[in-house]
Amino acid sequence: MSAVGILLCAGSSNRMGFDKLNTPLCGKTAIERSADALILGGCDSLVFVVSETSETTVASLPVPVPFTVVQGGAQRTDSVRNGLTAAEGEIAVIHDAARCFVSPAIVRASIDAAQKYGSGVASLPVTDTVIRLGDGEIETLDRSTLFRMQTPQTFRMGQIKAAYAEGGSATDDATLYAKKFGAPHLILGSEDNRKLTTAADWAWALTRLAPPPAYGIGFDTHRLVEGRKLFLGGVEIPFEKGLLGHSDADVLLHAIMDAILGAMKLGDIGKLFPDTDPQYAGISSRVLLHKVNDLVQKWDMIVSHVDATVICQRPKLAPYREEIERTIAEDLGISPDAVSVKATTTEGMNDEGRGLCISAQAIASVRHR
Ligand code: MG
């Protein structure tokens, strides 16, 4: 059976404060995203129901199926009625363009249900307790009979046209359908199939579309020798020995820098700050960390999280942990909550356990700012 998608794009965006349907959301508008989902879900053609302002924009969209553009009306019901008048096909898939994260699978399920049962309406069971507040009393409703209605709301064309021909108004199609034909068949929607209504919805959409963070790991080890100061995580720690290296040999910061550089795919600190270069002799690793962070920011990224383990028999690091975390966070310009430093001994085993060296491993994530 042929399915035509009726995409409702005539909303006023009053509660959003800007044209939410035609404003690109990470490169694609809500109208384009919804149209993609309808087509991928099985619609052979589309009817865009638009407001006057978006008519030309929508008409020039690169839509890979036959489509028409019609004007919406004052209410949602009027818009659907206009869309149905222009629609040709055996199944009508009515969808709010503001639900632009609908999955093609939900669209497909609604079409399948309409073919089998005459209707397929996306909805979600209510999981919260719902009450009706009366005059000083409440009535707790039986939530097993309650559903939150979404779209697509999909019907056999003849039936939904007949239901709309009866007149009347409703906030969704299932209500008008039910008046004439009884309860529609419900299919399971999804929390992701959220209607972009408020600024909070828009912020949620941006987060949902944000690329995942990138991760990198780092490892370093330095020999413990007499006559050197011990720096770990940028903090000087009183101890009878220190780490040997070209710089201040801060093994923890070195592992963290390698983790960050790995996440950025920018090589490692050996490549960036060669130990043959005299300008890095004795340098504080905090200066190097600043340089690494500058690189991250140059690419419009930010370090989002660091976790590290120092492998060290002595000294005990617990008293310095917080100061180390705070120092690293400060150097990276991020919250101390996003930096975690732990320490472990090797119970006297290995070179760390025998006090010959201190090692550190780290993982860091970076994301776009
Ligand atoms: Mg090193």
Image (cartoon, grey):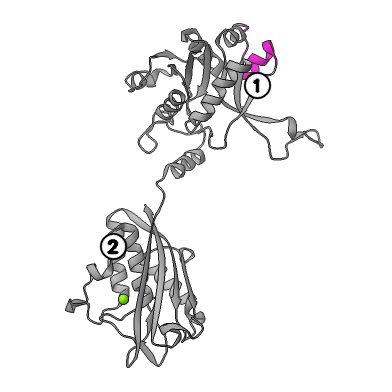
Task: Confirm whether residue 11 shows in the render.
Answer: yes
- Above or below: residue 36 compared with residue 68: below
Rate crowding at label 2 as few (under 14), some (14 to 19) or many (20 or more) other CA atoms within 10 Å: some
- Give the amino acid at mark 1: His
- Residue range in magenta is 166-182
Please tell me which residue lies in front, 241 or 147: 241
- Above or below: residue 110 compared with residue 364: above
- Give the amino acid at mark 2: Asp
Magenta segment: does it hold 169? yes
- Above or below: residue 367 compared with residue 137: below
| Residue beneath disc 2 | 294
Rate crowding at label 1 as few (under 14), some (14 to 19) or many (20 or more) other CA atoms within 10 Å: many
Which quarter of the rendered image does ligand 1 occupy? bottom left
| Residue beneath disc 1 | 185
Looking at the image, tell me whether mark 2 or mark 1 is earlier in sequence order. 1
Residue that appears at 44% across and 78% down? 311
